[in-house]
Amino acid sequence: MNIPQGEPQKPKPSNQHLRRNPPIAGEAEAIQSAQAGNATSFEFLYSLHKRRVYSLCLRMLGNVAEAEDLTQEAFLQLYRKIGTFRGDSAFSTWLHRLAVNVVLMHLRKKGLPQVSLEETLEPSQDDGPRKDIGARDLVLSGSIDRVTLERAVENLPPGYRLVFVLHDVEGYEHNEIAEMLECSIGNSKSQLHKARMKLRDLLHSGQRKEMAS
Amino acid sequence: MDCLEFQQQLPELYGSRTSLADHPHVVDCENCAALVRDLEYIAEQAKFLLPIHDPSPRVWEKISASLPPRSRADDDPRRVRNRNSGRLRRCSRRRLSDAWGRSIC
């Protein structure tokens, strides 16, 4: 590929691949049909998207029963609102955002993760910056499989997990997360950093247990 | 800049750049270099966490139970027309048979 001289290549956003939505065979027709009230087409859309919506709910909530309830609620909202989908974005993106909003509304009612999101940037004793990390020099690169990482994510505190899932897994930017969670951008960055540090600790301790056994 | 200062700045540093491998402190400090490698690896691997969980069948059962009752008209408008025309034909035959006192089918 020839790049004209003097024309810099624009860097791709680091999370762009998360927003890729390749067309699914039959989806466009099913959407139109469901918008007209066809229940079979709606069921088809459910079968196409249930896994992603449910996985999102489960990762954000960390609880199977809640995740199933909110998956149900997300699709019922989809049924009520599908007529408003105009095709400005990919359908899966639109549905994904709807599901995130359902989870966030639920969390606001419960109030749990917001407590940790209101945390200031003052480091706590457990999660603050460590002056000496010389003892923790295990290199993780290439040594952690995704199942292990998934399990570690499940073990994160709710506030950390929420921001980590939204940013690193689902690809939202900090300004978007701050708006969704009604916190500052600085808080979003801080929570993300702490989530990654906690994950590092969890993964390290998992490695040490394996080596000891 | 010492390790504590560097680590305190990490949340903001990551917000402004994708990799810190060439940060001056990282170049000079193997401890923080290892930390940065681990954190960037975690962030990178997270992107590939695919949706892997399916909801139980009862989720759809509950959704389906909450939807308006499905009428046969929901399925295919053409079937509605054919169905209705069949009803009309049957009604017509019944009326004629009643009028004539015998079935004409």
Image (cartoon, helix red, strand yellow):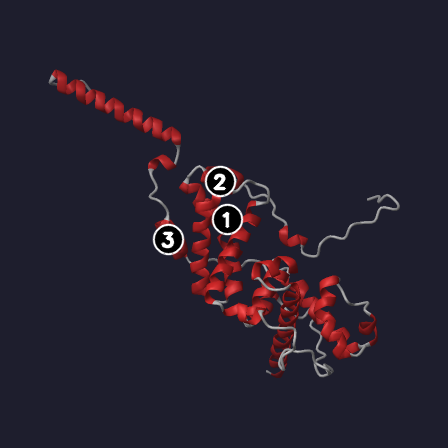
Q: Which amino acid type is shown beneath numbered disc 1?
A: Leu
Disc marking residue A33: none
Residue drawn at point x = 56 percent, y = 44 percent: A24
Task: Chain letter for mark 2, please.
Answer: A
Disc 2 and disc 3 on one polypeptide chain: no
- Dot 2: element: helix
Q: Which amino acid type is shown beneath numbered disc 3?
A: Glu
Whole-percent x, y for residue A111 in the image: 49, 67
Whole-percent x, y for residue B98 in the image: 13, 20
For the residues bearing labels 1 and 2, Cβ distance under 8 angstroms: yes
Above-or-below relation of B69 to B96: below
A14 and A131: which is toward the camera: A131
What count of labels does the image hold? 3
Disc marking residue A48: 1
Q: Which residue is mark 2?
A: A30
Whole-percent x, y for residue A107 in the image: 49, 64
Q: Quadrant of the N terminus of chain B?
A: bottom right
Q: Which residue is mark 3?
A: B61
Residue projecting furthest to the right: A5
Q: Is residue A56 visible from the viewing direction of this image?
A: yes
Residue drawn at point x = 41 percent, y = 56 percent: B59
Q: CA distance from mark 3 to mark 1?
A: 16 Å
Disc 1 and disc 2 on one polypeptide chain: yes
Task: Chain letter for mark 3, please.
Answer: B
Of marks 1 and 2, which one's residue comes earlier in the chain?
2
